[in-house]
Amino acid sequence: MSNYFSKVFGSSPVEPIQNHMEICFQASKKLVALFEHAMAGEWDRVAESREEIVELEREADDLKKQIRAQLSRSLFMPVPRRDLLDLLLVQDRIANFARDVSGLVIGRKMEIPASMQDDFLSYVVRNVDAAKAARKSIRELDELYATGFQGAEAELVISLVEELDRVENDTDAMQVRVRNELFSIEKELPPIDVMFLYRVIELVGEIGDMAERIGRRLELLIAR
Amino acid sequence: MDSVFIYIALAALFGLFMAWGIGANDVANAMATSIGSRAITVKQAILIAAVFEFAGAVLAGGEVTSTIRKGIVDASSLSAEPEVFIYGMLAALLAAGVWLLVASWKGWPVSTTHSIVGAIVGFAVVGIGVDAVAWGKVGGIVASWVASPLIAGILAFLLFNSVQWLILSQPDPLAKAKRYVPFYIFLAGFTMSLVTVFKGLKHLDLELTTAQSYLLAFGIGLVLAIIGKVVINRIEPNRKAEKRNHFFTVERVFAVLMVVTACGMAFAHGSNDVANAIGPVAAVISVAQEGIIGQDSPVSIWILLLGGVGIVVGLATYGVRVIATVGKKITHLTPSRGFAAELAAASTIVVASSTGIPISTTHTLVGAVLGVGMARGISAIDLVVVRRIFLSWVVTIPVGALLSILFFFILRAIFS
């Protein structure tokens, strides 16, 4: 025997979306260790980090599909379904970029030139910070739902997003610096390695960009 | 007169069967929002349901019972052969009861109200004639089936918006909740008791003037609000739980309010739905005893008691399990939402009960839930299910009617 009344309430996508963000952040966070190992030349441990990132990315992907399937067109929600799906996609790309970066590093046994290692690592850390700030805002999603996307809680999230933007601005500035450092020494390095170094710098920066876009998505949810 | 005894016994049996069905199944919907929001436990829900369903049936169930009993069928042309009326009412009861049993077994969204009204109209058209149906009244009832979810939805929308504005969007929601929730408790207590005092106490031979009624309702609301305030003041913030959810303690304040609205919901359900089971019983008994159709004596209280007992027995034997399952499935509904839906639905239903209009409790509640959803209160509502529930009466009425016609002919063949 089944009861029809309880079926009126679709299952909430909020908690799954928060879990998804958590996984994507964890994947990006592993990049710090991965680069540290790479700089130390410990390729076994780089491979371990790579495995962990791939595993997390897969987990995020599964969860993404599950949430998508759950968000059927017949649901009536306080926010447009499209916006939630977009948010989910942006979150997912954080894990994707983390996986791509890790793949490049291990695939090319990439060596970061000693002169730029410190700045490069801080650049990675700052991008991961951006993802962390995005996670912090997404952690407020349930409270946003609780308040109907308005009032004090909405203001709190707006301030978290502003903080996230500040971190992302840092990453942009740092990216310029790391690129310049590479530019100044690129003639001394094998050209193909340099190409891929530029590529990795770009991909790491994408993590910060995606984090920023999560902030934009949250602002949109609140603005409606 | 042997046949009189048989008629009454059958009517009481079928009526009990249907009341049992309502208690076993329908009550779960009325209580589900309270359990789903964790405001009360399943055990408390069952206790509340037992007490307030019974109270609602006995105190405020009279008007709808008389509508079902003599408002739908104009049987004055039948004075010569009152048996036809008796067969018809028995058939209607049996039809609605069987249909509900099948539907709840299959999990179809079927309303007791729609079943019984369809069944009575069905036998009246075939057994007596098209003119025997008080079409004006039936039209009004059908219109109320559209209006009641709408009204409850609007009420719930306004209620939840006021909660957002006064409490949830404020910088210190806990302090605001502690201040304003007692007012909502007052509102719930006042509305429920006012309608009951106006209409219900007739059966207890208590006549109050309008001023006295208002005063009494005001007093009941006030007492409830004060008790609520005392309980609320004892609630201490749970710092650990609030780390994860700032509204943890706020919702606990709303949970106090929800205990009151859960009582209101059970009361409202008892006041409206018990009539579906005992209205026909009352009709059969008065005709069988006195041979007169459509006379004006009020519904005797023992019939209301019968309905109340039936519901409670249904609740105890089977409803307990249904309530537990339904409650478990409704997660993500917090007390601040659940109360708005329940108060809106219960108020709408009680007003309908007091004017004698049989409406669907579940439809009204679904309308109220949608209202909270419109106010951005619920994270996801499945509109396909909602549509299916609202469209169900389109099927229920003809099925109830056909079944009742079938049983009508069978009963007439047996008895004559």
Image: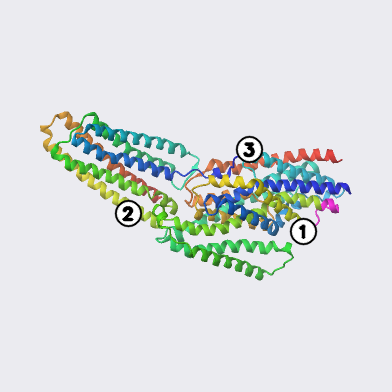
What residue does disc 2 label?
A159
Q: Which residue is mark 3?
A: B106
Spot occupied by residue B145 in the image (x, y as percentages of width and height): 64, 49
Is disc 2 placed on a helix, strand or loop? helix
Image vertical order of residue B102 relative to residue B148, above or below: above
Quadrant of res B400: top right
Position in image of residue A177 (x %, y %):
17, 43
Q: Is residue A191 left or right of residue B134?
A: left
| The residue stretch that appears in magenta | B286-298
Nearest the viewer among B136 and B41 is B41
Rounded to the nearest angstrom, the CA distance separating label 1 from label 2 is 65 Å
Circles 1 and 3 on the same chain: yes
- The three-letter amino acid code for the residue at tag 1 is Pro
Q: Nearer the viewer, residue A111 or A52?
A: A52
**Which of label 1 and label 3 is nearer to you?**
3
Which amino acid lies under the numbered mark 3 shown in the image of this protein? Lys
Residue displayed at 47% across by 46% down: A77
Q: Badge 1 is on which residue?
A: B298
Q: Three-letter amino acid code at disc 2?
A: Ser
